[in-house]
Every structure is written in structure tokens, then in C-alpha cells.
Amino acid sequence: MFNSKFNNALTIALVVAIILIIALIGFFGYSIYNKYYINNKANEVVDLFQQSIENQKNPNENQTVEDGNIVIGDVTEGNSIYSDNPSGNGQTVKYGGYNVIGTISIPKIKIEYPILDKPTSDALKLAIVYLSGPGINKVGNTVLQGHNYNNQLFFSNLSKLSKGDAIYLTDTSGTKIKYEVYENTTKRGDDASFYNRDTAGLREINLSTCTKNQEIRTVIFAREVAGE
């Protein structure tokens, strides 16, 4: 009797352990796949954005027209990634229904992402978003926001940036500007006091992401590097 109960308890414990192991493998497997998928798709959008810029300089190269949209190369998936030209004043690359207004590259933390034009919860799942200010590479202070998933995705490693680190923004005209970090600090999530500030006629940016404490955000201050 005792052995039977012991064996039953052991069997149940083993089944529970197996289920937990499968669940953990599934969780981490999905996390790795999801990170890979998002990064891969974001890289496609960055490439498409660069192709769009090249096509503005050299129109009608590597283009086809489908239902009024200019499709560049083979990087398409329904309407999730495409380039259109509704006004005739250049191309607009879209990702997930949002306009891509630039790209951001930070060599130290090895990221490169599109910048989307609206700070919605859905946009934040796809890329970096524009939050406030005059716009990408415009004079004044522009604030960009990204998620922190604690897995190297988006702005997860933003807190690792330090004074002198480089950040590169490319806008829709193809202009690429180097910004240099001069402060890495934290702010409360509801603190917007630094958004609109006097930059003395220079281009400046703030990069913002949440910390493990959801009420506190990591905020990077950076300004353009003259002559670069």
C-alpha cells in the first residue's frame, strides 16, 4: 500500500516536472523566436527605407507598382511593409500601417531600427517611435521612445550608454546625423519637463525607455556632432 502511494506521488511529481520543463522551453523558445522575428522584420524595413532614399535619387530603378503602391524589391508582406507615393513628393515607407520617418542606429548596443511616426502601443511592439519635438534631424529637441523587454530588443540596453557614445539618425531625405551622448539619467514616467527645451540652435535628442520599475524611465540626452 505504501509503495503504491509512493509510486503514484512520484509519477505525479514527474508529470508536473515534465509539464513545467515543457512550459519553460516553450516560453524561452517563443521569446527567442519572437526577438529574432521582430529584429529580422525591422531590418527588412530599414533596408526598404534605404532603398526608398536611393530611389528618390535614382527614380524608376527596382520599382513596380501594385494598386497605387510603389513596391521596392521583394520586401513585401500584404500591406505591412510597402512604399507609397500618394502626393508625388517622394516615397513613404510604411510598417504595420505606420509611416517610417527615419532610422536609428546605436553601434555600442548593436541596434538599428526604423522610427515610426506615432507612439501607440502597437507601434512600440514593432520599432522605435517618435514621441515629441520638431522631428528627425530637425533643429530643437526630439524625443524618441522604445520598449525595454530585458532581452536586447529595442531599447533594452539603453542604460548601458555613456558619455561620448554615438547615436545615428537618418531622415527621409537620406541625411544621416551623428549625435553624441552627454547624459544618461532617470526620470519619472510622467516627467515631460525636458521635452521642450532651448537647444541653442542645435539638434538634440532624448531616448526614453522604462526600467524594471515601471514608474521610472532611463533617459538619454545627446546632441549633434558638428561637422559630422
Image (cartoon, rainbow, N blue to C red):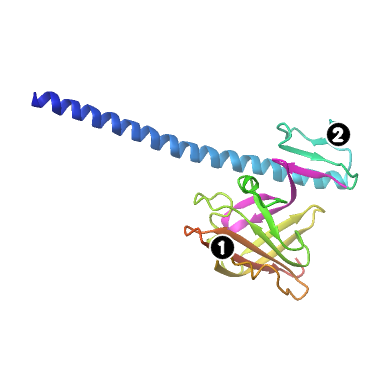
Q: Nearer the viewer, residue 97 or 173?
A: 97
Q: Quadrant of residue 36?
A: top right
Classify the position of the C terminus by image quarter: bottom right
Q: Report how far apart the C-alphas of labels 2 and 1 lie in the structure.
A: 42 Å
Residue type, mark 1 in image: Gly
Q: In the rendering, at what x and y percent does residue 129 appear? A: 67, 53
Residue 113, position as x, y percentages in the image: 66, 49
Write the residue at 55% across / 42% down. Answer: 35
Residue at 58% over, 38% down: 37
* Mark seen at residue 136: none
Q: Badge 2: few (under 14), some or many (20 or more) residues near its Cα, within 10 Å? A: few
Comparing 24 with 39, the one in front is 24
Query: Which part of the image, by quadrant, shows the N terminus?
Result: top left
Compared with 127, 221 (above or below) is below
Which residue is identified by label 2? 68
At a point 80% along the width and 45% down the height, the residue shown is 92
Above or below, 167 against 128 in this view is: below
Picture quadrant of residue 9: top left
Residue 73 x, y percent position in the rendering: 77, 35
Q: Which residues are magenta?
A: 90-115
Q: Secondary structure at mark 1?
A: loop
Residue 163 in view (yes/no):
no
Q: Quadrant of residue 141?
A: bottom right
Q: Position of residue 18 (x, y in %)?
A: 32, 31
Question: Looking at the image, is 188 positioned above or below residue 96?
Answer: below
